Amino acid sequence: MEAQNKDTLTVEKLAQNLANFAIDRTDLKELMAALPPGNDLNITAVEYELGILKILSVGWGISFFMAITDRNKGPVTQYFWETIQEISQSISDLTHTTTGTQVDYFNILKERLAVYVKGMQENPKATNPALIMGPVFAGVCGSPDNAIAILTGTKMFTLTLGAVKEYLNTVLIDDIRLN
C-alpha cells in the first residue's frame, strides 16, 4: 500500500484505536457462536479467557509488527498498555460495585501473560507461536486436552494478530512536532 493512501494518526490515537479493538467483543461473540453444541467446555471460562487472550494478542501484535527501529514503537506500546490499564480499572471498579468482590483485572492480564510466556519458553523450538497459544488457552480454560478449546484459542490469537498487522499496514504515525 502506498504511503499517500494511508491514514495519518498520532501515537496516542493509534494506541487508542488498538486498545478499542482489543476490548471489542464482536469477533469474540462470533467465535463463541461457532462452538459446536453439546461440547463439554465451560462456556463462561472460554468467553472470559478469549477476552483476555485478545487483549494480550493485540499487545503482541504491536511488538511483532512494528519494526524494532521504529521510534514510535515504544510510545505506541506504552500508550496502549496505559489505556488497557485504565479500562482494566473501570472493569475492576464495576465488578466491585456490582458484586462486592475486589478484582484487579490488570493484574489478571499480567498473570495470564506470564502463563502464555511460560508456555512459549517451555517450547523454544516452536516456530509458530499460535501452536503454543491454543494449548495454553485450553489449559487456562480448564480443558487442556479439548481440541475445540485449543482451536478456539489458536483462532483468536491468529485472527487478532492478523488484524493488528493489517491495521498497522494501513496507517502512518504523525511525527511529533515541537513548538
Image: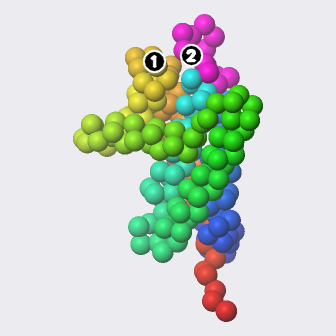
Mark 1 surroundings: few (<14), some (14-19) or many (≥20) residues within 10 A? many
Q: Is residue 112 left or right of residue 89?
A: left
Residue, disc 1: 143
| Cβ–Cβ under 8 Å for marks 1 and 2 | yes
Mark 2 surroundings: few (<14), some (14-19) or many (≥20) residues within 10 A? few
Q: Which quadrant of the view contains residue 115?
A: top left
> 71 or 166, which is in the foreground?
71
Residue drawn at x 51%, y 43% as measured from the top left: 107
Amino acid tagged 2: Asn
Q: Which mark is residue 20?
A: none
Is residue 38 inside the magenta stretch? yes
Residue, disc 2: 42
Residue drawn at x 60%, y 80% as measured from the top left: 175
Amino acid tagged 1: Ser
Give the vertical position of 35 relative to 64 (above or below).
above
The image position of residue 75, as x and y in percent, is 53, 69
Residue drawn at x 44%, y 56% as measured from the top left: 64
The stretch in magenta equals: 31-44
Q: Where is the N terminus found, in terms of image quarters? A: bottom right
The image position of residue 14, as x and y in percent, is 64, 63
Q: Secondary structure at mark 2?
A: loop
Farthest residue, direction right = 98
Farthest residue, direction top = 38
Is residue 103 inside the magenta stretch? no
